Image: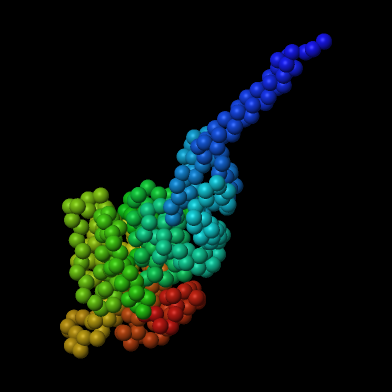
Amino acid sequence: MTVPPDARTAPQGRLVAGVFVRLLAAAVVLACVAARPAAAGSDTIERRGGLSTLVGSILRYDEGALHVRTTSGLEVEVPWDEVRSVEAARPPADLRRLLERGDDLWRARIRLQRGAFGLAEEGFARHFDDLAAGDHRLSLLVAEGLLRCRIVRGDNAAAVVPMIHVVRLRTLGLGLPWDRELPPVIDEPTGLCPMLPPAFVGGSGLERALEEVEALRLVAPLPLGIARRYAAAIRRELGLPAAAPQTTPGDEAASAGLLLLDRMLAAAAGDDPMALAGPVQDARWREAWARLFVGLAAARAAVEGAADAEPPPSADPDAAVDRAVLELLHLPARFAADLPYAAGLALRRAAACLDAAGRAAEAERLRTDLRRRWAGHALAAPGAR
């Protein structure tokens, strides 16, 4: 029997058609997968510090952070110090540089939290110039990390610019992971740094600090006002002309801190003996600042009186020196643990006051105490004054 041609070829035709349909469907699926947005999970960001790994898509990146949309649709900002690794279909062009810097800052951050301030300072200092002027969390990490390290080292002149950046960035509402475990470095009601009074030890570092402070470009009233007042204090210490900044109506949001600085600096200059009258002692550090600046002004007046060739008949140079020294010694006696720099500075200036009055033996006893209690501190260096 002869089989019709159509009957012989029909099964093969149906088989070919079925294969073609399946291949076409597979191609469509592959095309849809390829066209899917990256948010479906093509990028993986591994984080440090016990933070979970993120899967999603990299939306953008900048010097401060990696911005990611996770597969659940949540947008997350990951600062570079928290990024351990990145696997991405289209990684950032300079990913290696950003990861290396993030790793360096992570190490500096952990070292600071462990109390290894010397090693931590090196890490923060390497990246300060590149990052501190930004407006992201990494800027705050570098600025505050360097500030804390330099305060511990007693280099208050080098701490001024980091402090001003910290004030600027904190007023933007930025925070840091260590906020819950480390004491705040900025006093929130005033915006000032209690550990960094505007009183300095002379030296070449002070001239550099003045150049850096005056080169800052600031707009917000509080950091701008603080910068101007610290620059004025440094100028006075260096014997340069210094106009006293005044708080203006435009400074209202920052007036508490700026007015307090104005009162302290007026007292230190001896321009207004009543500058610190009133409620300045409502915080322990404010009392310490008040005693420091009143004592510095009294010491300056006592030294000038001792050098006067013809003092008034009623003047008692020794009594003036004793009053100045007593005021200054409040700091090492009562505030050494809270404000070691201010306490050491007060001790050094008290010794200088005694020296100027011809009381060398008493002055040497104070300097010996300074070297014993602040060994390795900038204030105990032979060239400091």
Q: Nearer the viewer, residue 368 or 92?
A: 92
Q: Nearer the viewer, residue 270 or 222?
A: 222
Which quadrant of the figure contains the C terminus?
A: bottom left
With respect to residue 189, does 203 lie above or below?
below
With respect to residue 192, does 29 lie above or below?
above
Which quadrant of the figure contains the N terminus?
A: top right
Tell me where residue 269 sits by quadrant: bottom left
Horizontal side, residue 111 vs residue 264: left or right: right
Place of residue 109 in the rendered image (x, y in percent of width and height, measured from the top left): 52, 58
Q: Nearer the viewer, residue 97 or 227?
A: 97
Horizontal side, residue 53 vs residue 277: left or right: right
Residue pushed farthest front?
2
Place of residue 85 in the rendered image (x, y in percent of width and height, measured from the top left): 58, 52
Residue pushed farthest top?
1
Q: Residue at x 49, y 35 (%)?
A: 73
Q: Residue at x 68, y 21 (%)?
A: 13
Q: Nearer the viewer, residue 133 or 67?
A: 67
Colouring style? rainbow
The reply to whether residue 329 is visible in this rendering is no
Horizontal side, residue 56 vs residue 127: left or right: right
Residue pushed farthest bottom?
309
Q: Residue at x 52, y 39 (%)?
A: 38
Counting the numbered discs, the total is 0
Tell me where residue 213 sits by quadrant: bottom left
Q: Residue at x 29, y 75 (%)?
A: 237
Residue pushed farthest right?
1
Place of residue 254 in the rendered image (x, y in percent of width and height, measured from the top left): 26, 53
Place of residue 343 in the rendered image (x, y in percent of width and height, measured from the top left): 40, 69
The reply to whether residue 145 is visible in this rendering is yes
